[in-house]
Image (cartoon, coloured by chain):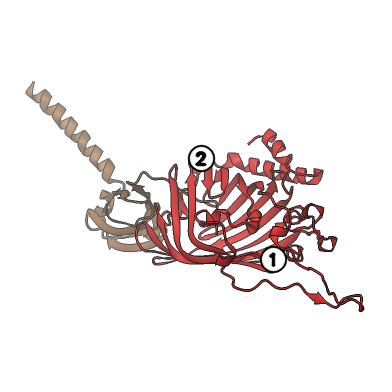
């Protein structure tokens, strides 16, 4: 990666300070590059775990079959049932495809790795059920929601004019169908990994390059793997920061939505702590048993929006996986 | 003519003796490479350690063997060859110790028959969840 490439990367920033930060991060990564050549590239330390370690230049497709759900924090939205979920990975010597991400690994040693990538921003997934987790599922109809709770009614307050028999209703929430459509966004980013034994720290910095929301994200993750005979338990903790631009595009309400001004909302930047655990048990060469759970606490910058009803997002899945 | 041939043969045989003495003067460990199916597989190897001639001539000396500085076993240097069982799953340093000091050191290497090279994924599997 050259300084020219770093200048290009810096152009993703929306202001001078951000551009400078991107450039510094990029150049810092470049400085590390000559230290380790490809010949020193780390082989997979956990080669028997076919999901963590993938053969070079082979398309690896795994499909999970089971039952699960992902909650949707938006008002009047439906949870997403999970029955069939794919996991796709292809890794070349440097280029890779990992589900919704395409990237280039600049460095990959036993204890450190760095890549730059472009990926689909998943925030838009809240606004539809056609996201990648549900590629095999039809679009939802109102009756097949996993949540059977009736939609909450609007709060009723006494009429201001006592002579009138009418009551006035103030809407405090609004459904996704009543606002303007939000677009998918493409992020570009850089990710650093620090490995030690079965632990990993990673830092991801992302910037919207599709000019949809023009926002940024920063994610710090700690992951650990425990091997117990045929069992693999992998807990991970992460903290994501999402910029005001990102959250405001998706959860802000303004004139574009054509709704009453009393619903207008400017979303602020916020932090999203998350914990996820996957438990896998190898059944044979191709089959594994999988239990997956994830909990994300949503920041007030998002949950204060009239579009948002819940303060968390959860995913649970159990089933078997088959590796082709 | 016969005497000349005999002299040449005698010289050659002396050279040969000289050569073998030179070899047995140092330690020799065989084999040092283990072939496994896949990287990470455990290798069980019976090492044959050739004791140098000079030690055989002396009174019995205790020789110890270590893998990455962990003592595996000790034996008396009364026989020309000593066998040691080792178990390892990655490249290891094998040492011969005399009176607690390293007298000889070699690497035990693992090679795989599987040509598949694997890489660590940069994202969590099942990131679509």
SS under mark 1: loop
Nearest to viewer (mark 1 / mark 2): 1
Report crowding for label 2: few under 14, some 14 to 19, many 20 or more residues within 10 A (C-alpha): some
Left or right of A254 on screen, residue B75: left
Q: Earlier in the sequence, mark 1 or mark 2?
A: 2
Residue A105, x across and y down, in percent: 56, 43
Can residue A222 be seen in this snapshot? Answer: yes
A187 or A69: nearer the eye?
A69
SS under mark 2: helix
| Above or below: residue A237 compared with residue A132 | below
Can residue A277 be seen in this snapshot? Answer: no
Residue A237, x across and y down, in percent: 60, 64
Report crowding for label 1: few under 14, some 14 to 19, many 20 or more residues within 10 A (C-alpha): some
The label number, if any, that marks residue A284 in the structure image: none
Which residue lies under the disc numbered 1? A75
- State the image quarter where residue A223 is shown: bottom right
Which residue lies under the disc numbered 2? A38
Marker count (numbered): 2
Left or right of A287 on screen, residue A101: right
Q: Chain of mark 1?
A: A
* Chain shown in red: A
A307 or A117: nearer the eye?
A307
Colour of chain B, in one word, is brown
Q: Quadrant where the N terminus of chain A lies?
A: top right
Residue A148, x across and y down, in percent: 59, 73
| Above or below: residue A180 compared with residue A70 | above
Which residue lies at the image location 34% right of the left edge and 62% below the top edge?
B72
Q: Chain of mark 2?
A: A
Residue A271, x across and y down, in percent: 71, 62
Which residue lies at the image location 52% right of the left edge and 41% below the top edge?
A94
Which residue lies at the image location 44% right of the left edge and 49% below the top edge?
A60
Which residue lies at the image location 87% right of the left edge and 76% below the top edge?
A159
């Amino acid at each position: 990666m050259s300084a020219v490439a770093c200048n290009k990367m810096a152009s993703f920033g929306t202001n001078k300070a951000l551009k400078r930060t991107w450039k510094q991060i990029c150049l810092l990564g470049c400085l590390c590059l000559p230290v380790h050549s490809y010949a020193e590239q780390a082989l997979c330390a956990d080669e028997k775990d076919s999901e963590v370690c993938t053969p070079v230049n082979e398309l690896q497709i795994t499909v999970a079959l089971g039952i699960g759900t992902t909650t949707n924090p938006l008002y009047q939205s439906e949870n997403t049932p999970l029955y069939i979920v794919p996991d796709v990975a292809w890794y070349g010597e440097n280029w890779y495809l990992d589900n919704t991400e395409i990237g280039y690994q600049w460095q990959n040693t036993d204890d450190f790795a760095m890549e730059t990538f472009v990926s689909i921003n998943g925030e838009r997934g809240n606004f539809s059920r056609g996201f990648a987790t549900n590629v095999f599922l039809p679009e939802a109809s109102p009756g097949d929601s996993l949540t059977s709770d009736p939609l909450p009614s609007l709060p009723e307050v006494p009429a201001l004019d006592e002579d009138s028999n009418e009551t006035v209703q103030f809407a405090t929430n609004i459904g996704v169908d009543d606002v303007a459509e939000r677009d998918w966004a493409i992020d570009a980013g850089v990710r650093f990994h620090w490995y030690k034994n079965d632990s990993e720290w990673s830092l991801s910095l992302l910037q919207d390059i599709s000019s949809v929301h023009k926002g940024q994200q920063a994610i710090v993750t700690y992951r650990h793997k425990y091997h117990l005979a045929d069992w693999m338990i992998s807990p991970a903790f992460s903290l994501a920061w999402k910029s005001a631009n990102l959250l405001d595009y998706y959860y802000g309400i303004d004139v574009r939505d054509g709704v009453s001004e009393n619903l207008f909302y400017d979303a602020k930047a916020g932090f999203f702590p998350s914990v996820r655990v996957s438990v896998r048990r190898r059944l044979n060469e191709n089959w594994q048993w999988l239990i997956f759970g994830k909990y994300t606490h949503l920041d007030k910058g998002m949950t204060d929006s009239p579009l948002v009803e819940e303060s968390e997002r959860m995913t649970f899945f159990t089933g078997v996986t088959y590796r082709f | 003519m016969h005497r000349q041939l005999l002299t040449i043969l005698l010289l050659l045989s002396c050279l040969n003796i000289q050569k073998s003495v030179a070899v047995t003067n140092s330690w020799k460990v065989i084999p040092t490479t283990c072939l496994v199916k896949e990287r990470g597989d455990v290798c069980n190897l019976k090492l044959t350690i050739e004791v140098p001639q000079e030690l055989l001539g002396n009174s019995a000396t205790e020789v110890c063997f270590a893998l990455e500085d962990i003592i595996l076993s000790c034996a008396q240097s009364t026989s020309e060859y000593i066998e040691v069982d080792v178990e390892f799953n990655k490249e290891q340093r094998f040492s011969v110790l005399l009176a607690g000091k390293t007298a000889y050191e070699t690497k035990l290497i693992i090679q795989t028959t599987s040509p598949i090279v694997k890489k660590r994924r940069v994202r969590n599997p099942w990131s679509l969840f």
